[in-house]
Image (cartoon, rainbow, N blue to C red):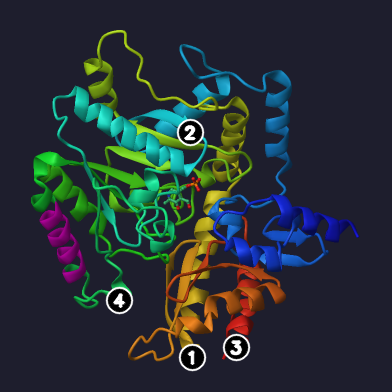
């Protein structure tokens, strides 16, 4: 009775992100009630292994009391302090310093947002401001990758290059451009890593030259494409793109919203590449989803460019009521302690290697064309014919069927376009949890044969 009532209210009043609104009216929601470690329980009492850490954000796993205590302490002491004007709170200052210490090079200036989309928007706004006050006001064009995802806000959604996020929304603006993804499994230049990197370099150069290098503001990319299908670039790809940006005087923004905070092994995925971008965006694992928070981190050059060239005494007009929210920052500080002193980062690295090994074994399965990933981020791409890499007929709606079959087997994961299944289990997983994930996934795939 209680559950039916709740389901009725959900259908009547709660508008869900990224669902078909009419389908939702028919099928309703799985109402999640509680979580512990890597496991979730729904309102019907069913238990699931959360193979996606919520929305690839609950990196530490569910049920950490110390995080709840940090939030409660802060709420009791001071639930809100504006970051506007010249006010601040201790957690926001301490957390900004902690992030600045851990981001590479001179990425030392942290602007807090509420999540990833407004971190991306803030990066765009700061870049425009920077170019306008440093004598390059004609730098208006932004370039990103096809299959990239940079959020759903009205600006960031134009950097996103997934058709679903453009269709019926009037698409990207005339100042937003996309070059092909490096996508090793389906790159027209073939599997050679050198050829893939060379092709991306060529595409970026060609777009920059078409627009006029002096008109391009920045290039945005994820270190590993997430929502585009968990697509891992060849080693050296990011460095090569950075090199092109430098040659043309274009800023590089690395979007670590998914890949940050141990998801791929190190604290940030770009550490593997030794690249120091001009700006970096982050969210999700920043608080492990225990409270909303995002950040854009500015290099010394960008920060000083604005500080020293903005009209004297004039405020930089970009602000959110909840920027640097003290409760979110207190949560973030405790989550960071759990990654480091609590050993979750190290556990994620150990279990991530095991996860990749087990995922690799799935390439034996008749439906799996490729398995790929890094650390606790992984995907299997399904095909009807492995040699030809033939995609399934989209009318079969295979991903939807697999998500349902998975849920029936107690496994939550995500499906992306082109029959790609994505996995991002929490860093707290044990190897036994990973074995269970693979067992339930294999059974799901077998049931779809
Ligand atoms: N950037 C990337 C790479 C993302 O994956 C996402 C969300 O998945 C975003 C930005 C947007 O973040 P949010 O959903 O917190 O607004």
Q: Earlier in the sequence, mark 4 or mark 3?
A: 4
User: Residue 106, can we see it?
Assistant: no
Name the residue tied to disc 1. 366
Q: Residue at x 62, y 64 (%)?
A: 22
Q: CA distance from mark 2 to mark 4?
A: 36 Å
Q: Residue at x 45, y 26 (%)?
A: 97
Span of residues in magenta = 195-207
In the rendered image, residue 235 lying in the magenta stretch gets the answer no
> In front: 225, or 99?
225
**Place of residue 18 in the rendered image (x, y in percent of width and height, measured from the top left):** 54, 58
Q: Residue at x 70, y 19 (%)?
A: 77
In terms of secondary structure, where does tag 3 sit? helix
Q: Earlier in the sequence, mark 2 or mark 1?
A: 2
Name the residue tied to disc 2. 113
Q: Earlier in the sequence, mark 3 or mark 1?
A: 1
Q: CA distance from mark 4 to mark 3?
A: 25 Å
> In front: 272, or 240?
240
**Place of residue 66 in the rendered image (x, y in percent of width and height, measured from the top left):** 70, 38
Task: Determine whether label 2 and label 4 are within 8 Å by CB.
Answer: no
Name the residue tied to disc 4. 186
In terms of secondary structure, where does tag 1 sit? loop
Name the residue tied to disc 3. 446
Dot 3, how many residues are within 10 Å of its Cα: few (below 14), some (14-19), or many (20+)? few
Q: Is residue 369 above or below residue 410?
A: below
Please identify, in this view, whether the residue under mark 3 or under mark 2 is nearer the observer. Answer: 2
Q: Quadrant of residue 29?
A: bottom right
Dot 4, how many residues are within 10 Å of its Cα: few (below 14), some (14-19), or many (20+)? few
249 relative position to 279: left or right: left
């Amino acid at each position: 009775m209680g559950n039916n009532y709740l389901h009725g209210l959900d259908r009547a009043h709660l508008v869900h992100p990224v669902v078909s609104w009419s389908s939702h009216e028919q099928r309703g929601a799985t109402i999640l009630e509680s979580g512990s470690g890597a496991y979730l329980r729904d309102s019907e009492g069913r238990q699931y292994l959360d193979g996606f850490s919520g929305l690839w954000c609950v990196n530490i796993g569910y049920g950490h009391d110390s995080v709840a205590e940090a939030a409660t302490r802060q709420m009791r002491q001071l639930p809100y302090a504006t970051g506007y004007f010249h006010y601040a709170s201790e957690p926001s200052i301490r957390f900004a310093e902690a992030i600045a210490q851990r981001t590479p090079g001179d990425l030392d200036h942290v602007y807090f947002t509420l999540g990833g989309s407004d971190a991306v928007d803030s990066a765009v706004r700061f870049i425009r401001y920077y170019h306008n006050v440093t004598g390059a006001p004609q730098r208006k064009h932004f370039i990103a990758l096809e299959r990239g995802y940079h959020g759903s806000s009205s600006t960031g959604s134009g950097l996103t290059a997934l058709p679903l996020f453009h269709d019926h929304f009037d698409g990207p603006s005339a100042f937003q451009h996309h070059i092909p993804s490096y996508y090793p499994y389906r790159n027209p230049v073939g599997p050679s890593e050198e050829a893939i990197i060379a092709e991306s370099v060529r595409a970026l150069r060609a777009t920059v030259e078409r627009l006029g290098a002096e008109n391009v503001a920045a290039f945005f990319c994820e270190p590993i494409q997430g929502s585009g299908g968990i697509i891992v670039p060849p080693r050296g790809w990011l460095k090569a793109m950075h090199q092109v940006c430098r040659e043309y005087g274009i800023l590089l923004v690395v979007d670590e919203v998914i890949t940050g905070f141990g998801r791929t092994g190190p604290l940030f995925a770009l550490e593997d590449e030794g690249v120091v971008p001009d700006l970096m965006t982050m969210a999700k694992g920043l608080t492990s989803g225990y409270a909303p928070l995002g950040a854009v981190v500015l290099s010394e050059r960008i920060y000083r460019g604005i500080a020293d060239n903005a009209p004297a005494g004039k405020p930089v007009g970009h602000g959110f009521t909840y920027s640097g929210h003290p409760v979110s920052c207190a949560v973030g500080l405790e989550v960071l302690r759990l990654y480091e002193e609590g050993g979750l980062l190290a556990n994620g690295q150990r279990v991530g290697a095991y996860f990749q090994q087990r995922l690799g074994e799935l390439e034996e399965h008749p439906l799996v064309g490729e398995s790929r990933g890094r650390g606790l981020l992984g995907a299997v791409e399904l095909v009807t014919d492995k040699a030809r890499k033939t995609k399934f007929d989209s009318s079969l709606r295979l991903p939807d069927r697999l998500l349902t079959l998975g849920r029936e087997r107690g496994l939550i994961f995500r499906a992306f376009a082109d029959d790609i299944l994505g996995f991002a289990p929490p860093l707290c997983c044990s190897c036994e949890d990973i074995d269970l994930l693979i067992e339930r996934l294999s059974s799901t795939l077998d049931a779809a044969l």
